[in-house]
Structure formats: C-alpha cells, structure tokens
Amino acid sequence: MLLRPKHQIEADQVHVWQVLADNVPYTDGLRAHLVETELARMNCLHHAKDRELFLLSRVLMRSVLASYLDCPGCDVCFACDNHGKPTLHADRHRERLRFNLTHSRGAAALAVSREREVGIDVEDRRRKVEHMALAERFFAATEAIHLRQLAEEERADAFFAIWTLKEAFVKGIGRGLAFPLEAFAFDLERDLLKAFRPLADFVSPEWHFQQFTLGDRHRGAVAVQQPKGSTVTIEFRDWASAFLASSRGEGFA
Ligand SMILES: CC(C)(COP(=O)(O)OP(=O)(O)OC[C@H]1O[C@@H](n2cnc3c(N)ncnc32)[C@H](O)[C@@H]1OP(=O)(O)O)[C@@H](O)C(=O)NCCC(=O)NCCS
C-alpha cells in the first residue's frame, strides 16, 4: 500500500528522498501509480532489474512531489526545460517546486527544493570503469592529476566522488552531459564549498555541494544553487519508511 503523507519544505531547505530497490521487494503493485507513457517506456527496457528501477524511480518521483503538492501522484504533471531537465508543468501546478531525479543499479534518489535549482547523481562505486582513461578524457586537468597521484585502492572511490559532484552540477544547471565536464573543477582535499572553481565564466559559482552514500554500494552528490549570503540545509529521508505502509508488500495499491 502506498501511503499519501503530506510534506512541507522551506525556502532554505533541500530534501533528498532515497530508496534502495532491495528494500522494496514487491514492486508489481506499484505499476498502478504510473501513467501510460511511463508504463510504455518501462516496458521498452530489456532487463527486469532496469524495469524495476525505472518503476521505483517514477513512483518515488510522483509520490514525493504529490506529498508536497497535496494531490494524487497520478495528477503530477511534468514538462521539460530547454535542455530537457524535467520540471513541474507550469500550467498545471501553481507551486514552483524544483526537483531532480537520479537512478543507478538498484538505487534512486530525488532532490526537492522550493526555490533553488538542484541537481543530484548517484553511482554504484563497484561499477567497473577505466577511471584514469575517463578522467583524462573528460575531467579538468587538476582532477586527473589528483586521481593519478592516489594509490590504486583509493582511486575508484575518488573517481566516483568527482564524477557524482560533476554530474550533480551539470544536472543542477539543467545542461546534463552536453556541458563540458572539464570546464569546472573540484578539489576533494579542500572544503567542498570552496572546491567548486568555475572555469567557464557563464556559470555562476554560487552552488553548494554535499556528498552522501546510499547503502554500502552507492555514492552520491547533490548540488544546490546558493545565492551569496544565503544558507541551505540538506536533509536525507528514506522513501520506503515514509511511503510504504508495509515493507513486506502486503496489498500494494
Ligand atoms: C541527464 C543526464 C546527465 C543523465 O545522466 P545519467 O547518469 O544517465 O542519469 P541519472 O540517473 O543521474 O539521471 C536521469 C534523470 O535525470 C533527469 N534529467 C534528464 N535530463 C536532464 C537534464 N538536462 N538536466 C537535469 N536532469 C535531467 C531525468 O529525470 C532523468 O530520469 P529518466 O532518465 O528516468 O527520465 C544525461 O543523460 C544527459 O546529459 N542527457 C542530456 C544531454 C544529452 O543527451 N547529451 C548527449 C549528447 S552530448
């Protein structure tokens, strides 16, 4: 059974709702919460695990946004900005909530804010990738140099730390991976707030970043627009315990 709690969010807050697919073993009943276009997109996915995570991500997004908008999940209506970033449909919702979704290998998270642009990314840190080859091709030179200096066993974690920070930022500004990842750099050894160095003068440096973990496999980062002089509080919340009536899946709606 999917619950319909009500939530509120203040102007200086960001709520990050997280879910691990392993904590929601009975997902079939959740299909009823998707609209037809979403079901069609889900059914195009080849692997059962991908279909399950897509379903869970969509239910996470609809149920969480509905809890702030105080409407049924299926009434949440989406649009996209010029670069494809999902937004609330302005004609259907008076409330101007900002949000961003991420999902990767059994984990999903949604960042919600009232006024600030937000971006979020989660990655499975066990994913096998050529860390140095990717860093040298896509990251800023200082980041690649930092990774090269690390011991082999530290490199994968540092790579995903930088990757998720970068992706959270490009999703925050709505440009996605079309934005050059070498145009800005993080320095993991410095305070995160100071670590963002925009090399591209058309991007405002006023962003706040926070890293997090989800279970023992996933690493994530959230980027929040933070005008000078303002504060931001980021709160992490577990979706399953707030929205599922029973973690054993009895009678999902
Ligand atoms: C958006 C993007 C960064 C997602 O990266 P990812 O690691 O695969 O996926 P994540 O799980 O973190 O995020 C996916 C979610 O981000 C959101 N999203 C989509 N476009 C977005 C954008 N431009 N900005 C912010 N968020 C976006 C969606 O909710 C999406 O969920 P969905 O795929 O289930 O619809 C990437 O797909 C992208 O850059 N796309 C747009 C640009 C592009 O296509 N460039 C290719 C040519 S260079």
Image: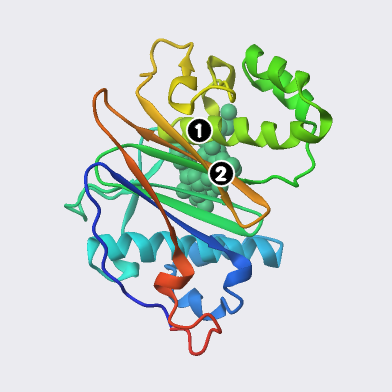
- Which image quarter holds the C terminus? bottom left
Identify the colour scheme used: rainbow
Q: Residue at x 24, y 40 (%)?
A: 115
Label 1 to label 2: alpha-carbon separation: 16 Å
24 horizontally vs 115: left or right: right
Q: Residue at x 77, y 24 (%)?
A: 132
130 with respect to 97 (left or right): right
Circle 1 crowding by C-alpha within 10 Å: few under 14, some 14–19, many from 20 = some
Task: Give the secondary structure at mark 1.
Answer: helix
| Label 2: element kind | strand
Residue 246 coordinates in the image, percent (x, y): 48, 83
Going by the numbered disc 1, the residue's amino acid type is Gly
Residue at horizontal 49 percent and vertical 21 percent from the top: 195
Mark nearest the camera among 1 and 2 is 2
Query: Counting residues from the N terminus, which is met first, the one under dot 1 or under dot 2?
Result: 1
Question: How dense is the environment of label 2, judged by Cα within 10 Å: few (below 14), some, or many (20 and up)?
Answer: many
Could you say which quadrant of the image residue 193 lies in?
A: top left
Relative depth, front residue between 46 and 195: 195
Relative to 112, say whether 32 is above or below: below
Residue closest to the eye, 142 or 136: 142
Residue at mark 2 = 220
CB at disc 1 and ligand 1 closer than 8 Å: yes
Residue 52 lies, with reference to residue 85, above or below; the image says below
Disc 1 designates what residue?
A: 176
Residue 104 in picture, x, y percent from top left: 62, 51
The one of 157 and 45 positioned closer to us in this rendering: 157
